[in-house]
Image: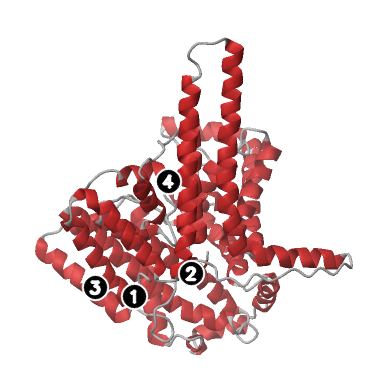
Amino acid sequence: MLFNSVNFLIFFPIVVSVYFLIPGRLRQYWLLMASYYFYMCWNAKYAVLIFFSTMVTWVSGLLLDRCRDGGSDSGNGGCNSSESEGRKKLTVRRELIVAGSFILNLSVLFWFKYANFAFDTMEKLFSAVHITLQLPAVDVLLPVGISFYTFQALSYTMDVYRGEIYAEKDFFRYALFVSFFPQLVAGPIERSKNLLRQLAKTTEFNYERAREGMLLMLWGYFLKLVLADRIAIFVDTAYNNYAVYTGWYLVAATMLFAMQIYCDFSGYSVIAIGAAKILGIDLMENFDAPYLSNSVAGFWRHWHISLTSWFKDYLYIPLGGSRCGKVRKYINKMIVFLASGLWHGASISFVVWGGLNGLYQIIEELGAELLKSAKPKATVNAAASKYSGTRTPGDPGWIGAAAKWLLGCIITFILVDFSWIFFRANGCREALLIIRHMADLRLQGLSMLTDGSLYLCGLDRANFLLMLAALLVLLAADICKKRGIVLRRVVLRQVLPVRCILFTAAVCAVLTFGVWGPAFSEANFIYFQF
């Protein structure tokens, strides 16, 4: 069931109404049934996979909790050597439980998402040494959102192991944590410390939260229907015919794809956050104006925050993080980004996309260290001038600082946008062909801006200008966000007539200008394939 479907617009009000009408003790059961129904609308039989992941991680949490209790009991009496030996055994047992949980869950993920990719890669490697290897093709449909709910369930296992969260005794509450429908199929990937504890509380309907949630959902629909789906028409036309739309057309399409995937994915996240807020649940923010970052590292701190922080907490830090020397730190970064690329899809092109972003960050850090070592005196002078109120010759002032920030944003966008080519293309070979056709840049090709040929890529003049206007609205909203201005709360502070006018105008704009795919049909969210 898509957020941008009539079915969801019927389903969600029913869920909310019943949720707040029934007694508190029944609400989690109602939400659990609604969440499973929501997921089963795609493919009913794959609900078994969510149940399997839920059961494995729930049992592992209980076993980990029992081992911890056993460890505390074993310290009563006895000699120190026997106590130490008992603790070692318990530690090994706890590690085996975590390993078992990860192996079982990742095995399911591997079979459905990576088996064909792994078998194909093995066949090619053996073929390179003149050995014919024929492995069976796995004919299965990728379950929607399997990567998201698998990672969310595994984070619970690790949090219990680390002692950061209690082991949930109530199976139904834990099952709701794994399957909570607003963020089930495309995140945010919630932590047990946040979501599970909220589900343990009974909340009553809150009018203020409901209003804020509705505005969030409306903004998400604007991003998806008015922007992402409209941009997709242009991008798909150019990328599906890259031999025809060469040069500047592909440059424009690549720049627009960066905005398409941002609007599409953040649109889903915002709708999910708004829907959960109406139900009394606060989900973590997943995007924070990432394209206003002036470094690739900054971009990744503000893009898909739930996944980035997941890899940081459960892969980067366990690998040693930045505590084990520069070379090892850079290796750890590359491992994380290569793993992130593979998480997104079973293709070498996704791995290349992740590797490029990891390489960008390593080069950035090395460059920053070189600049820091080359200008120690300038740094001291700048620090002194900050307190004296005077400007040093090397101090550019606020205009220079703004220009430097803007240049950093532009360079970051170009680098990230180039890597998106490998994300969007159907494999590395197609990505390289697109880059090759894109490199055919000629000065006369810029005439597409004035001769009307730009409007032959699926969007006519009116729709193209509407897209640009909507992008300016997005830019203004992101700038406000960076400055700490929460626009929905500004709207909610207005008097009732002004609020009604603004809300009605926004709804009419989304309904009037929203595009449901090229044929006005419900368009999938991009991240559903992951």
Q: Nearer the viewer, residue 515 or 459?
A: 515
- Dot 1: few (<14), some (14–19), or many (≥20) neighbours within 10 Å? some
Residue displayed at 20% across by 61% down: 18
Residue 412 - label: none
Q: Secondary structure at mark 3?
A: helix
Could you say where residue 125 lies in the image, as x and y percent from the top left? 81, 63
Q: Secondary structure at mark 1?
A: loop
- Dot 2: few (<14), some (14–19), or many (≥20) neighbours within 10 Å? some
Q: Is residue 366 above or below residue 487?
A: above
Kindly identify the amino acid type of the residue bearing the numbered disc 4: Arg
Residue beneath disc 4: 191
In front: mark 1 or mark 2? 1
State the separation of the CA atoms marked 3 and 2. Answer: 24 Å
Residue beneath disc 3: 507
User: Between disc 1 and disc 2, whose residue precedes?
Assistant: 1
Residue displayed at 61% across by 20% down: 85
State the separation of the CA atoms marked 4 and 3. Answer: 33 Å
User: Between disc 3 and disc 2, whose residue precedes?
Assistant: 3
Kindly identify the amino acid type of the residue bearing the numbered disc 3: Val
Residue beneath disc 1: 5
Q: Is residue 87 visible?
A: yes
